[in-house]
Structure formats: structure tokens, C-alpha cells
Image (cartoon, helix red, strand yellow):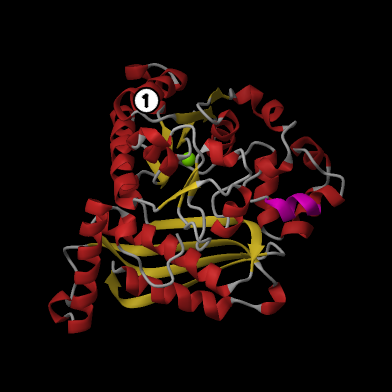
């Protein structure tokens, strides 16, 4: 069985934990009260006003004028994330982090030691609560896709186990939106064809999905049948680091898109530096309103971990691949790959002066961020 463990409203919960006076109030991390940038996280109180992550801050402000906006403290969240990761590792080496606050675990090999996957899930959830004072939702199922749906459905404070024989019965009544990547527009396309639940989707011919969503439809078809054979790949075998956002509303505003790229890149670069890695390749994933998804990448002559280097390539890739005819964008992802350890980089001695300066800026930024929080330093064009 696979476990999906996801912290509830992570950034906002860390802030509430550290500032008890915030409890019970609508809290938004990211964006600013003047309505610039995007919401990085919202606590459950703020969500009750309809506020969601990745929503423009201006819209959030309109929905809840009394919301408290906080600048993200990525360094602090990364530290908490590390502590949670260490708890996972006590139970199994097979931990695949998806972002700072969620991970897949394969604990099959640890059952003799700690009990079955359900017992392991309970122990981890309790340990996170006792040691870190935060709430995690846990989903346990035969594969990644179903485990993720299970942890999501249980939120907040969820704990849901789906046994292999129960997978199809569990999925069937769910709305198609539960399928990975089906957002508002996918929902509408399927609704026009009379398809609202996963069960209804399964009754229709497979080619229908192919016609609606292209190649990606094949993946959807497998998910709808509870099939997903992707293994859990642990951190040290990870060949890339990525981060992506699905927008609540399709976006075509280049400034807003750029500010999303800045946020995505800052997190990816931070994770890269934290693991003392550098990347040779920067990739961008764009899903357009018509569900066509493209990935474009660009390789550098030399590996880097500076935010500025990664950012300028990511923005170039975005600008060259924005096609008017394909309309607005529903999902944006940024990835780095061809990772090499920081120490052994050829030609490092011949680093030029401006590169040295840029690396100095990042080191200083990381230091200041870990001392005073993400808000202390802002890159031009930054979203959150
Ligand atoms: Mg979460």
C-alpha cells in the first residue's frame, strides 16, 4: 500500500502555530493587502470565504476584506518540512516529497517492524501532531493516485484507507474533478457530455477522453479505473525538482504569469541549494485552456543553482511559448533536471565576476530569509 501524507493548509498552519493570536481569523500567506501577487496558502477560515491558493490577491481581498495577509517565510516552512521528512524516514526509506508539505511513502517493507500501512499512517500522523504541533491528512491506498484522492477527501485532519478491493467503489461516485488535472474547464467539457461522476466516465468509450483531452486522456482513463503503476521514488534518486500551479481561472496576463514563475522558481532554487545540487536543464510545462500541454526545456553549458539564472531561462521559455491562438493558460510548472552535486563542477575555477556576484546575492538572500523570513527580500516581479 502507498501512503499520501499532506499537511493541512501548511504555510498558514505554521503561521497560526507560531502566532497564536491569528487563530480563528482568516489568514492568507502570500500576495499583499494592496491586492498584488497571488495567494500561496489560505487557512480554513479564509477558505470559508471562497479563497483558494493561486488566486490573485486582489480577488481574495474582495472576498474577505478583513483577511490578514502575511508574507511567506519559505525558509521557516522548509525547516519544518525537513523535520516532517525526518519523521517519515523513521518508518521507511521510500519517501517521495512532492512539495514542502506532501509526500508519498511506500512502507511495504517496514510492516514487520511497525505493523501494517494503516498502523504506520496512524503513528506518523500522531508523531507529527505531538512533535511538530501540526495536522497532517493521510490517505492510504494501493497506488499513488488513489492515496492522494483519499488524503484530499479526508481533509482537514483526515485519515482514510482504501483497500484494494474497494478502489472502484470508492472512486465511482466521486465527481470527475477528483481526477488529477481536471479543473473547472475539464469539468465543463465533460458536463456538456453528461459526464459528472467517475462512474459515468467509465461507462463511455475510451476514445472520448482521447478526443477531449488528447494523449493526457489515456492517463485519465487509467485513473478512472483506479490504475496507477508509478512507483514511489525516494529523494536521493530524484532526477529533477519541480513545482507547478493549476490556476482557478485560466490566465493570460503576462505579468501575473511571470509572477507565478518567480514564485515557482524561488522554491525550486531554494530546494536545489538546500540539497547542495545544481541543475543543467530548466524546463517549463504549460497547459493551455484547450488542455494541450507542452513541455519545453533549455540546457545550460554549465550547471547552476542561482535563482536569477534559472529564472531568466524560465521566463524566456514562457515568452517564446505563449501562443495567442491557444488562449489562456490553466497550469504552469517549472522544473530543473540534470542535477549535479555542488562540489564537483568542472570549470568552477573559471567562474566569471558577474556569476560570483549573483551567487553571493543568493547566499545572502538565503541567509536573510532564514533569519527574517521570505518577506525580507523581494525580487523584482515577485508574485507572492
Ligand atoms: Mg497540503
The residue range painted magenta reads 183-189
The structure residue drawn at horizontal position 79% and vertical position 42%, both measured from the top left corner, is: 201
Q: Quadrant of residue 377?
A: bottom left
Q: Is-magenta flag for residue 258? A: no
Q: Quadrant of the C terminus?
A: bottom left
Q: Residue at 69%, 40% (x, y): give it.
A: 224
Task: Say which element carries label 1.
Answer: helix
Q: Position of residue 260 (x, y in %)?
A: 49, 64
Estimate the x, y position of residue 164 in percent, counting from the top left: 60, 25
Percent x, y of residue 368: 22, 58
In the image, taking residue 369 as reference, residue 289 lies left or right, namely right
Q: Is residue 352 visible?
A: no
Residue 151 seen from this side: yes
Asked if the stretch drawn in magenta spans residue 188, the answer is: yes
**Is 339 rendered above or below residue 351?**
above
Identify which residue is drawn at 50% across, 57% down.
Answer: 244
Indicate the quadrant where residue 312 lies.
bottom left
- Taking the view exactly as shown, the residue that stands out farthest to the left is 349
Amino acid at each position: 500500500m502507498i501512503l499520501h501524507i499532506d499537511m493541512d493548509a501548511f504555510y498558514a498552519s505554521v503561521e497560526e502555530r507560531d502566532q497564536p493570536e491569528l487563530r480563528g481569523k482568516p489568514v492568507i500567506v502570500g500576495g499583499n493587502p494592496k491586492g498584488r501577487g497571488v495567494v500561496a496558502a489560505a487557512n480554513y477560515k479564509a477558505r470559508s470565504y471562497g479563497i483558494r491558493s493561486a488566486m490573485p490577491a486582489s480577488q481574495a481581498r474582495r472576498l474577505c476584506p478583513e483577511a490578514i495577509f502575511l508574507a511567506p517565510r519559505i525558509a521557516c516552512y522548509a525547516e519544518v518540512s525537513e523535520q516532517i521528512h525526518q519523521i517519515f524516514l523513521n518508518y521507511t526509506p521510500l519517501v517521495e516529497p512532492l512539495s514542502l508539505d506532501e509526500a508519498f511513502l511506500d512502507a511495504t517493507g517496514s510492516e514487520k517492524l511497525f505493523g501494517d500501512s494503516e498502523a504506520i499512517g496512524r503513528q506518523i500522523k500522531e508523531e507529527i501532531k505531538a512533535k511538530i504541533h501540526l495536522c497532517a491528512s493521510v490517505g492510504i491506498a494501493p497506488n499513488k493516485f488513489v492515496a492522494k484522492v483519499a488524503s484530499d477527501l479526508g481533509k482537514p485532519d483526515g485519515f482514510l484507507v482504501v483497500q484494494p478491493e474497494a478502489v472502484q467503489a470508492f472512486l465511482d461516485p466521486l465527481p470527475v474533478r477528483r481526477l488529477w488535472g481536471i479543473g473547472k474547464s475539464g469539468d465543463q467539457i465533460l458536463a456538456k457530455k453528461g459526464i459528472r461522476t467517475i462512474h459515468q466516465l467509465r461507462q463511455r468509450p475510451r476514445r472520448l477522453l482521447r478526443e477531449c483531452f488528447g494523449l493526457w486522456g489515456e492517463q485519465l482513463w487509467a485513473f478512472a479505473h483506479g490504475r496507477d503503476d508509478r512507483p514511489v521514488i525516494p529523494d536521493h534518486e530524484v532526477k529533477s525538482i519541480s513545482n507547478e500551479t493549476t490556476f482557478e481561472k485560466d490566465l493570460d496576463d503576462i505579468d501575473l504569469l511571470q509572477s507565478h514563475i518567480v514564485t515557482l522558481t524561488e522554491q525550486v532554487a531554494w530546494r536545489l541549494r538546500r540539497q547542495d545540487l545544481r541543475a543543467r536543464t530548466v524546463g517549463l510545462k504549460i497547459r493551455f485552456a484547450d488542455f494541450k500541454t507542452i513541455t519545453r526545456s533549455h540546457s545550460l553549458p554549465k550547471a547552476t543553482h542561482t535563482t536569477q539564472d534559472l529564472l531568466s531561462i524560465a521566463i524566456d521559455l514562457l515568452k517564446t511559448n505563449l501562443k495567442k491562438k491557444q488562449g489562456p493558460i490553466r497550469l504552469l510548472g517549472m522544473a530543473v533536471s540534470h542535477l549535479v552535486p555542488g562540489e564537483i563542477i568542472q570549470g568552477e575555477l573559471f567562474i566569471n565576476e558577474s556569476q560570483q556576484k549573483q551567487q553571493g546575492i543568493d547566499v545572502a538572500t538565503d541567509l536573510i530569509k532564514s533569519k527574517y523570513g521570505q518577506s525580507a527580500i523581494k525580487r523584482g516581479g515577485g508574485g507572492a
